[in-house]
Image (spheres, helix red, strand yellow):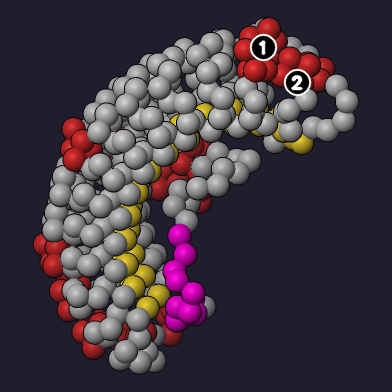
Amino acid sequence: MTVEEETPAIQNLHLSEPDASHSEEDAEDLAAENEAQENDAVTRGFPEGVVVLPDESPEQFDADDDLTSAYADDVEYIDLIHLKVKSFEALGLGRFQQLKGLCLRSNLLDSIAGVKVLNEELLEDLDVYDNRINHISKHINALTKLTSLDFSFNKIKNIKNIDKLVNLESLYFVQNRISEITGLATLKRLRMLELGGNRIEVISDTLLQLPALEELWLGKNRIKKLENLGALKNLRILSIQSNRLTKIEGLEELENLEELYLSHNGISKIENLEKNTKLKTIDITSNRISDLDGLSHLTKLTDLWCSYNQIADFGRLESLAKLPELETVYFEGNPIQLQNPPAYRRKVRLNLGPGIKKIDATYVTGNL
């Protein structure tokens, strides 16, 4: 993942109210889903050469099978986006026995039982992002060659019936209604797991069974503690923004961690990162940080996002001046910026030195 100026979209989803009940949050689901879809926490393209049907006037089709009538029997990729598809069965997918990828994003599917007609020996990518699915059919377990599966923006409450998908490398459940991390223990090849925008309160020990995991996205949940991460020796990216954390802990064994996203929590101290010396990006935006102790040993750090905290003294920045790779910092919304905006960037550079290239998304050049 290449880090851009802005933080990932999931970061922009605000922290849930800590005392809200499930029933109260149910009433807000639609608004939350709309916001999250606009931010589009997961953006993923299909392979080059995919056949795409236009999204101009879906009403013109009399039946769903008309949507696939133009495809040759030996087509490998079918992409039907935003076409009001209501069922797998009506698409007549059984004749496409060479299919490797099927994308049915933004339709009206409420069931995936129809996947049973697909060639389980060839299908590698199934994308049903943004539908009305509330249950994972047992028939999906037959698609054992799947490497990527996307259930984002549906109404799923339980992760189940995917335990036989042992070749999965990427799994997406963004913005569903999941409260527990379960049903994943057999997915030993999983490298990317996206569970942002759910109702998860505890990081389950199920994750201890996923040694190949490289990216874990848990933003906008209800998690209070960083735990059960020790077995993830290959983890490079951990995103847990917009939760209920108050402490950085439980990361000691993640020695390959390169990107850590902790924005919109209740953390008051940067600590317990002594072993995470490969960190390149840290996002601690919108917490309760008042000093920057605990970072001086991170010699590979290039980006520090620390906006909207409680840093009131430019002297707190001095420990960062020794970081040889640091180029980008964000401190807007802190007292050091709010008290004297005109002088703010100049003082940041004076304390951090000429190595700083960007302050709050603004490139800085010239003499100090």
Distance of label 2 from label 1 (alpha carbons): 9 Å
Badge 2 element: loop
Which region is colored magenta? 44-55
Is the stretch drawn in magenta largely helix, strand or loop?
loop
> Amino acid type of disc 2?
Gly
Query: What residue is shown with label 1?
Result: 318
Badge 1 element: helix
Q: Is residue 216 visible to us here?
A: no
Residue that appears at 19% across and 57% down: 166
Residue 228, x across and y down, in percent:
24, 29
User: Mark on residue 359?
Assistant: none
Question: Could you say which quadrant of the image residue 185 lies in?
Answer: top left
Residue 274, x across and y down, in percent:
43, 18
- If you read the primary sequence from the N terminus, does the residue marked by circle 2 or circle 1 appear first? 1
Residue that appears at 62% across and 22% down: 323
Residue that appears at 36% across and 70% down: 103
Question: Horizontally, is 37 left or right of 203 in the view?
Answer: right
